[in-house]
Image (cartoon, grey):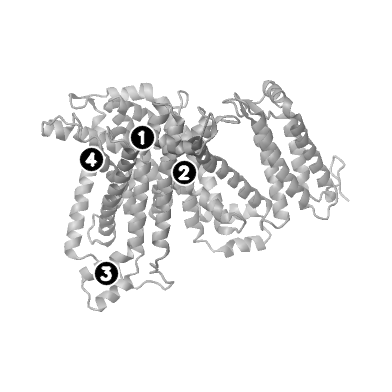
Amino acid sequence: MAECSSGIDVTAVRNPACLVGGLGLLLTTAAVPFIAREGQAFGFGRAHLRLTALALTDQFPGFWLLTALAVAWVAAGLLQEERPHGPALWGGVAGCLLVVWLTWAAGVKPYAFGPGAVLALAICLVVLASGLSRGGYIRADTFVAASILALAFFVLLFILYPIFAVLQHSVMDSRGFRPALFVDTLRNYQAFWRVLGNSLGLAVFVGVISTVIGLAFALAATRSRSRITVLLRSFSLLPLITPPFVVGLAIILLFGLQGFITSTLLGLKTRGIFGFPGLALAQTLSFAPVAFLVIASVVESVNPALEEASLTLRAGPWETFWKVTLPLLRPGLANAFLLTIIESLADFGNPIVLGGEFEVLSTEIYFSIIGRFDQTLAASLGIVLLAFSLATFLLQQCWLGERSYVTVTGKPPSGKPMPLPRGLEIGLLSFCAAWCVFTLALYLFVIYGGFVEIWGINNAFTLRHYRQLLRDGMDALNTTLILAGISSPLTAAVGILLAYLVVRHQFPGRGALEFTSMLSFAVPGTVIGIGYIMAFNQSPFLLTGTATILVISFVFRNMPVGIRSGIAALAQIDRALEEASVTLRASFATTIRRIVLPLIRPAIISALVFSFVRSVTAISAVVFLVSAKWQLSTKVILDQAENGRYGLATSYSTVLIVIMALAIALMYLLVGKRAAAGGLEGGGLA
């Protein structure tokens, strides 16, 4: 019987997970700092070890329990057991609870979790996963079980916990738990009903107009016989390559107090563009392309046989369009309408630049934190905003869930899509062309604004703003690109892995994990931002002011992009390919590496590029999380725009637009138009 060099009979190891986990846990508790100082969560050295020993003095019973559990695991790994998964299962549960308790109890400000806490929790999760796998509770190997547990923990910590922190601050103060605090706070905020009415009225207006414009573009791009449809499709790229407030800046340059149209051409000195008119225009320009993406995919999926049947029954082109084609587009119209309402409610960039005295919920949350330093008011307004966003998603499910719009029956479609009636086609193409020209003019003025001294006052050509950007703005730009570059592969990995687990495996809580992981679609960025401030600005999670919190925000804010891309790609791969690999005794890791990953390569690249793009252009959540050391480009642009330095703001925006356009072009070259369009649609929803 073979023996290893240490003298241990390897054939006697009935539970290697317990043995390795116990040895790893012993090493962790003895040599790795369990906690660290604020901002030094992953610090090592003697000082950190002494800090851990000092902080855990009052918790030695719990700490020794963790050590005893590690010894018990080692023994269980070496002993013959009738049910070898038992120690891993129950010991894993006990270990996770012990680590969480020790971390929470020892993390008293300015101390936070350290590398020892992270490593110990990871070991306990892996051992627990082994017990669940070997016990048949999760019908997969240890890697899959561990992935499910780890992702569930991350979703709980970085999505649900911040939302809970916002809810907690709305009903708790120094006197303890007071459910009436939420109502009292909103009652004392005299502008609440006006702000709520402004937000909802603007959202509904933008939703209707954006859906109509998106429908016009979708019909023109998919059913027109003109060659300019390629240009119309490029219209859908604009919201992705544009920082959130660039459209607002362009509107100010055209229609503001010193605007080119209002001041130079018409001789008017007016601030009328600030408030509802400017916000409605800016949000419509920003969100109509998203509505176009949603509706266009539905238009392309309509079975031409239905329209041909209508024409065969002697219905004219107009009657067929109104009674057959348009009703079949109802799912796309509903999705586009509700999605743009949510985008409008969550929008922060345009209201902060163009809002003026027209207050909306997203900016009032920001000013409650930054201006009034009132976390209770910010949390209460955040709960209101979150409630309306979630209610809109529920309305979407109720509206569409009880109706059938099936046109794809499994039989190959016959015929070509019915062209639009000639008059409608000419009208749609004319409108779309005019809208594209107006949109292009806005972007040209943004670029031009970076090359003039003082907009509307001294329009002399200058490179001063770009020289200042090279001198003072490169640090923020480098930081943005580095953090986006770090978060993008993490976002793609987490999203694709979660998509694979949800699509390919059945396990308890699968539906809940899928729903909560996609929840960031419905949670406005400002709510996530204040949630992170409230959840991770106190022990044991002292992360605010660090690069770690920014990367975490990027990853879990953009994770649905990877999930959508992964689900779409995996739906096209036959399970038989993976089953054949397993039948040939390939491990799960080998099957993933040799079979799955090569087949979903377009989805991976799509998730990488779009998570990078969205990280670079993020503002609503990260505006609360940036610090003097970790400054981001979008926050710099916002600060310059608020201070009236439009030249520097537009030059910085131009640089970001060029970077985003290059990233999108690279993805088109790597994965092709179809995969890019799929990723684009997923990206527009986040």
Please determine whether, in this image, residue 578 is positioned above or below residue 382.
below
Q: State if disc 2 and disc 3 touch (CB < 8 Å).
A: no
> Which label lies toward us, 3 or 1?
1
Nearer the camera: disc 4 or disc 3: 4
Viewer-nearest of discs 3 and 2: 3
**How many numbered circles are shown?**
4
- The numbered mark, 2 or 1, whose residue comes first in the sequence reads 1
Residue wearing tag 2: 558
10 Å neighbourhood of mark 1: few (<14), some, or many (≥20)? many
Dot placed on the residue nearer the N-terminal end, 3 or 1: 3
Looking at the rendered image, the disc whose residue lies closer to the viewer, 4 or 2, is 4
Q: Would residue 526 be visible to someone looking at this image?
A: no
Q: SS at mark 2?
A: helix
> Where does label 3 land, which residue?
323
Q: CA distance from mark 3 to mark 1?
A: 43 Å
| Label 2: how many Cα within 10 Å (few below 14, some 14–19, many 20+) | many
The residue that disc 1 covers is: 363
Instruction: Looking at the picture, tell me which residue is in the foreground, 292 or 475.
Output: 292
Label 3, secondary structure: give it.
helix
Name the amino acid type tagged 1.
Thr
Residue that numbered label 4 is attached to: 277
Instruction: Tell me the CA gap for discs 4 and 1.
Output: 17 Å
Q: Residue at x 52, y 40 (%)?
A: 164
